[in-house]
Image (cartoon, rainbow, N blue to C red):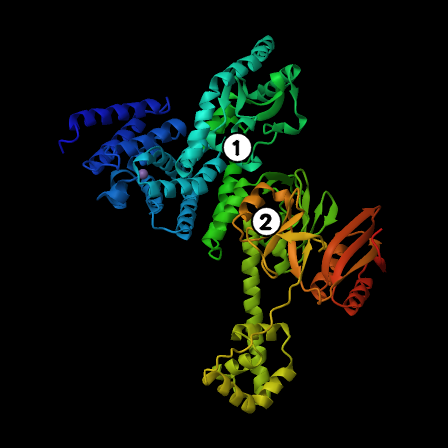
Amino acid sequence: MNKFDLEEENKEIVRRYKSLLRSCNKDINRTDKRLIRKAFNIAVEAHKDVRRNSGEPYIFHPISVAQIVAKDLGLDAISIACALLHDVVEDTHYTLDDIEKLFDSNIRQIIDGLTKISEFSSEQDISKQAENFRKMLLTISDDVRVILIKLADRLNNMQTLDSMSRIKQQKIASETLYIYAPLAHRLGLYTIKTELEDLGLKHTEPEIYRDIARQLNETKNARVQYIKRFTKPLKSSLNEHNLKFSIKGRPKSIFSIRKKMKMQGIPFREVYDKFAIRIILESELKNEKSDCWKTYSVITDHYQPNPDRLRDWISTPKANGYESLHTTLMGPGGKWVEVQIRTKRMDEIAEKGYAAHWKYKQSGKATEGNLEDWVNQIRELLENPESNAIEFIEEFKLNLFSKEIFVFTPNGELRTLPKGASALDFAFDIHTQLGATCLGCKVNAKIVPLSHKLKSGDQVEVISSQKQKPKKSWLNYVITAKAKNKIKSSLKDEKKRIADEGKEILQRKLKSIKLTYNDRIINELANYLKYKTSFDLFYDIGIGVVHNIMIKDFAKNRNSWYQYFKNKIYKKSPQKIEVKEEPKYDTLVFGANQEKLNYSYSKCCSPIPGDDVFGFTTIREGIKIHRQDCPNAIRLQSNYAYRILETKWIDSTNKQSVAIIHIKGIDSVGLINEITKILSTNLNVNIQSMNISSSDGVFDGIITVLILDKNNLKKAIENIKLVNGVTSISRKFKTS
Ligand code: MN
């Protein structure tokens, strides 16, 4: 190995190790130092003679990861030691038992977590990646440090990607953009997220990356001049108000500039906010809020703010703990300039995320609770074996990117939900059982249907009934992954239960017409009635659509039909048995009220009737219909949730009509329960909307329902008349 100057290399290893120690938190003690030293020695020994693709000694990598863990994340000595050891079990002769013997069970557990999330090999397809990602998130529940060290590992791999083959670069970089950058974002690690994104872009779209980097560089001087001109008057005013501060002007990341160019379809020079000004205040904890707003007031004396672009994450921090005050001001030369105002403490949290929370844990702010909630949410999802890994990630990402709303329980407890969440999402968020039995909700004391979209600040109370059960249509009302998964698994259970019941009914029926119940007979019957599987047959018997007469017919025709069947099938005639006719879909309807609107199909996925679809409101071309599995769907749904229209196929020959019922009575929650129960559970009438107002204990309700025939409605009205407290009920013919 003369190719390498070993002595020089060893000196370099020691230099890097010393620099690592300098990056550690000032207050680490001697025990901590001993632990780091020990981990370092073992790692050096374990990886000796091994080199990375670049030709460098392998140990450079764990040292760099440890450096990120110490410096960028500010984590503790255990994390630093684990970062040094992170590849030891996977790549060398050391076992987890060795690690436990050398250190302790805690370190073993973290290394185990890191080893489980093995590197994604380049042959792996997307579903394997998804499965790996899920495994990784599962480890959050063990120790969040595993995820943080894994992110540091990924960052260093991205920093050293140049020596990899082109194909590997592409693969690792797109995976980074797909999974790791959003994860870093959600954890509030903005510095790492930005670097991952920029490196990701550099390796997935190198020309574009270089082009933007070059233009940023060319415009640097002008930008610096402008920032100086913009901040000069601010500095003197802030000084006059005795505020201690520093001002930074930072260019936006290349990735975010690229995103803007792409989303708005504009060239580089038209992206107006290529930089942001950050004012960082030195402020005591108790003065933080007032100092930030004082600063806001000082700077808006100089420049006109855009009222639509004020973001106050100080009064309500983001779920990941981010706190800051953002405003956009009209600067010299008519340019909009974004200004971020925050204190040093807030800035550190924004840069280092979770780690900084540990540091400020004693500060009395409950920011940590939110992260805990988030980790819990993820854990619940992961524990659901029903959900498919890719679907899970898509939904997870959807929840990552979408904005949040804040709502309150009747006790005033704050809950965070993704924007667009419905009353039903809220019920499932509180408790699975509450979601499953939810009849409706009271939002700010008004009764609303399950599909009602919540807004920040709403106070929500769930109305439930033990008789209520999840229904298929509910899937259209919810957007959170938790609610979706719980509804799906409950529907599956329900279907199986009904099929089991149907099977028993069939056994009795066959016995009464003197036919033995066995597989052959069941197959014959299923074929005769044109079912694809016996399960479908059992299910339909269970819900009562297979009538006795059909089974009797089968018994009567069995012999002759059996001959016919034999001729058809066993002579291998090319003709297939007809399958049961699919429901006919021919009309699209939109929104909770199933309105008919003009629309056209999108070219990117060309949906056909019956496909799972959604409507997207475009500016020039009206409503465009996309398939739910369209490659563009996730992007549209995450970036433009407010432009998505709930869309459903209906069979226009199956005439459902809308009826409006007007009910008056004496106000009580029990009364509403009774009425909704009668409408939705007993008579298969679909509630479309409910508007109920009440004053002085008297309520007045307009309920819009969908009915198949008038008899159903008549029965419903008669039953509602019998409910205690109802004083009048009538049908209306127009909403007025
Ligand atoms: Mn590694």
Q: Confirm or deny contact between disc 2 and disc 1 (CB under 8 A).
A: no
**Residue 384 appears in the rendering:** yes
- Sequence order check, earlier mark of 2 and 1: 1
Residue 69 is marked as none
**Residue 196 appears in the rendering:** no
* Callout 1: SS: loop
Picture layout, residue 712 above or below residue 593: below
Q: Amino acid at mark 2?
A: Ile
* Callout 2: SS: loop
For the residues labelled 2 and 1, the Cα–Cα distance comes to: 23 Å
Picture layout, residue 533 above or below residue 640: below
Residue 641 x, y percent position in the rendering: 61, 44
Which is more toward the observer, 428 or 398? 398
Residue 321 is marked as 1
Q: Give the label, 2 or 1, closer to the camera.
A: 2
Q: Is residue 30 left or right of residue 491?
A: left
Which is more toward the observer, 205 or 156? 205
Residue 524 x, y percent position in the rendering: 52, 83
Residue 167 x, y percent position in the rendering: 34, 43
Residue 479 is marked as 2
Q: Residue furthest left?
A: 2
Residue 435 x, y percent position in the rendering: 61, 53
Report the quarter where the N terminus lies.
top left
Q: Is residue 5 left or right of residue 509?
A: left
Picture layout, residue 105 above or below residue 676: above
Q: Residue at x 57, y 85 (%)?
A: 510
